[in-house]
Amino acid sequence: MTRHVLLVAAVFAVLGGSAQTSSAPTPALPVAPTTAAESLDKMDTRRPVPLLPMMANHQKQNMRDHLLAVQEIAAALVTDDFPAIAKAAGRIGYSEQMGQMCTHMGAGAPGFTEQALAFHRTADGITAAAKARDRARVLTEFSATLQTCTACHALWKQQVVDESTWSRLTATPAPKSHELPH
């Protein structure tokens, strides 16, 4: 028994504790200097597109709809449903409203707006080819559109910022949620 008590006392001495129970809180584990999200962001070398939270969410909703349109184009290609191809491609094609939104979203990232608009204008080629019922050209335009899509995602990432940062980077006041183009 004495041997056991001496062993426990020795262990506590080595670990820097004592054999007595302490009411002091257990020290927390060391905190990493950055969060996991910050660590991941540091590894992501793409260029940031600064956006307010509501803008980032709006952009993600649009990206999901773009992906749905791409899926609809692919499905319609299987059956040569050219009206469905044209309709889906029209959702990702260029419009004045889309141009305004891309310009607004890219206000703090030089080069982003031009690349985003190139994507939408490239998608217009799918619509034109579908209206001409030219399957081979639809495939060529679809491929070109997907290349502009993946090139943009390879270069840019969202960076959620606060209103003062947004205003500083864009030299414009932060928009209200109802002011975003749809």
Image (cartoon, helix red, strand yellow):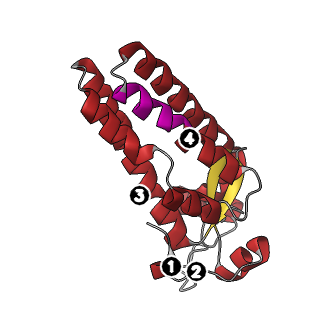
Inspect the image, locate mark 3, and give the three-letter code of the amino acid beneath it.
Gln
User: Which residue matches tag 3?
Assistant: 61
Of the image marks 4 and 1, the number of the one nearer the N terminus = 4
**Quarter of the image that includes the C terminus:** bottom left
Q: Residue furthest front?
A: 132
Residue linked to disc 2: 175
Give the CA distance from mark 4 to mark 2: 26 Å
* Amino acid at pointer 1: Glu
How much space separates mark 3 and mark 4, taking CA atoms?
Answer: 20 Å
Give how far apart the Cα atoms at labels 2 and 3 are.
18 Å
Contact between labelled residues 2 and 1, with CB atoms less than 8 Å apart:
yes
Q: Report the residue at 45% width, 81% height from top.
A: 178
Mark 4 or mark 2, which is nearer to you? 4
Residue 21 placed where, x, y %? 52, 79
Q: CA distance from mark 1 to mark 2?
A: 6 Å
Tell me if mark 2 has few (under 14), some (14-19) or many (20+) residues whose alpha carbon lies within 10 angstroms of its own.
Answer: some
Read off the residue under disc 4.
121
Q: Which residue is mark 1?
A: 179
First reached walking from the N terminus: tag 4 or tag 2: 4
Residue 142 appearing in the image? yes
Q: Residue placed at 66% from the left, 47% from the top?
A: 156
